[in-house]
Amino acid sequence: MRLTDLSIKRLKSPASGQKTYFDDALRGFGVRVSQGGTKSFVVVAGTARKRRTIGRYPDYSLADARKEARRILGNASFEDMAQRPSVPFTGAKDRFLADAESRTKPRTVSEYRRLLNRHFSYDKSLHEITRQDIMRVVEGLRPTPVEARAAFVAVRTMMNWCHKHGLIDTSPVPRLSFSTQARTRVLTDNELKIVWRRAEAYGYPYGRIVQLLILTGQRRGEIASLRRSWMDGNTIVFPAGFTKNKREHRMPMGPMVEEVISALPSDTDLLFPSRLSDSDPWNGWSKAKRMFDKPLQMAPYTLHDLRRTFSTNLAKLSVPIHVAEKLLNHVSGTVSGIAAVYNRYSYDEEMKEAIFAYEEYLNINLK
């Protein structure tokens, strides 16, 4: 109930003992009514939930009692903070990542670890981290909007986890949205030729990954995680649960894709295993791209721009949009919703024709 002078006057005495009526307007503040009719203002404060008596009504006015309750509640919060064991930011980060490993995909945990270690290094306690500290880092990444957004999501996820597990009272990044301008970069034929030739010369693994990105239009994580056991004849079958939309994706291979794959080392199931483990995919993106791009005389681009370029070139070749979306494994395009439920046609032949036409286009323009 909301306490007012009128509502307090109307409170009835309990048949025995005491009864407390708490105020909806101020959490922890209320009036305790005794069997004999005595009414006293009380406040329950602190993590120990200790009850303190402020004074009797009407000797103590409602306004003065509320003011005193706010003071007590405020002091209790500071006392709680002082008594809480200090958790270093680095320690909280390690605990978050350890927990994430037990419930999150390995590549997601790996990305969280990279982003948090690279961008958020604070030599102070977790509860001392402010919103300004976080946003100063994120704003500094504005020249690389994709990285900025990824870093923001990673630290927001960590701070929400810390709040949920009682390490902090509130997250310093609550309910903030971080938007980036949609990217529109499409490489020209000449730029694509420059990147392709650099990839041929750069070699395994990064150069070969770039070639497959150009040839297939798939996401970088999907190509880096490619396995020989996913190949069915001249088709790559990405398993359900692995892809971004959690659906099996069948991608036809053209001659150029088969040529690149056939030249790769063949001693592991993974086409691109990490240096430390044959069971984990290669993940050295930042350093490899920096070295790869260093001699290129062209405007900056991202690996995802190669996917957009693939889609744009398919449109240039008059490939129907629903076939292009099938190749890109989009589920929110022209064949989606209820239409996707009833239209179960695979478009395998149409996708194969599109890939052969695209590779013919590349053969002409990459020479």
Image (tube, rainbow, N blue to C red):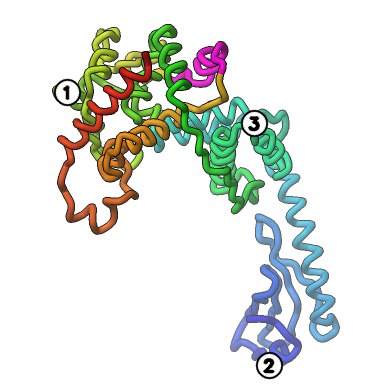
Q: Are marks 3 and 1 in contact (CB under 8 Å)?
A: no
The verdict on residue 294 being magenta is: yes
**Where does the image place residue 169, in percent across and percent down from the top left?**
65, 50
Secondary structure, mark 2, is loop
Q: Quadrant of residue 192?
A: top left
Residue at label 3? 120
Q: Is the magenta region chiefly helix, strand or loop?
A: helix
**Residue drawn 66% across and 55% down?**
47
Residue at label 1? 234
Instruction: Pick the quarter of the image with the C terminus.
Output: top left
| Mark closer to the chain start, 2 or 1 | 2
| Mark closer to the chain start, 2 or 3 | 2
Residue 46 left/right relative to 164: right
- Write the start and end of the magenta stretch as one range: 283-297
**Where does the image place residue 69, in percent across and percent down from the top left?**
78, 68
> Can residue 101 be seen from the camera position used here?
no
**Residue drawn 14% across and 22% down?**
233
Residue at label 2? 10
**Where does the image place residue 332, in percent across and percent down from the top left?**
34, 49
| Mark closer to the chain start, 3 or 1 | 3
Spatial separation of the CA atoms under disc 2 and disc 1: 83 Å
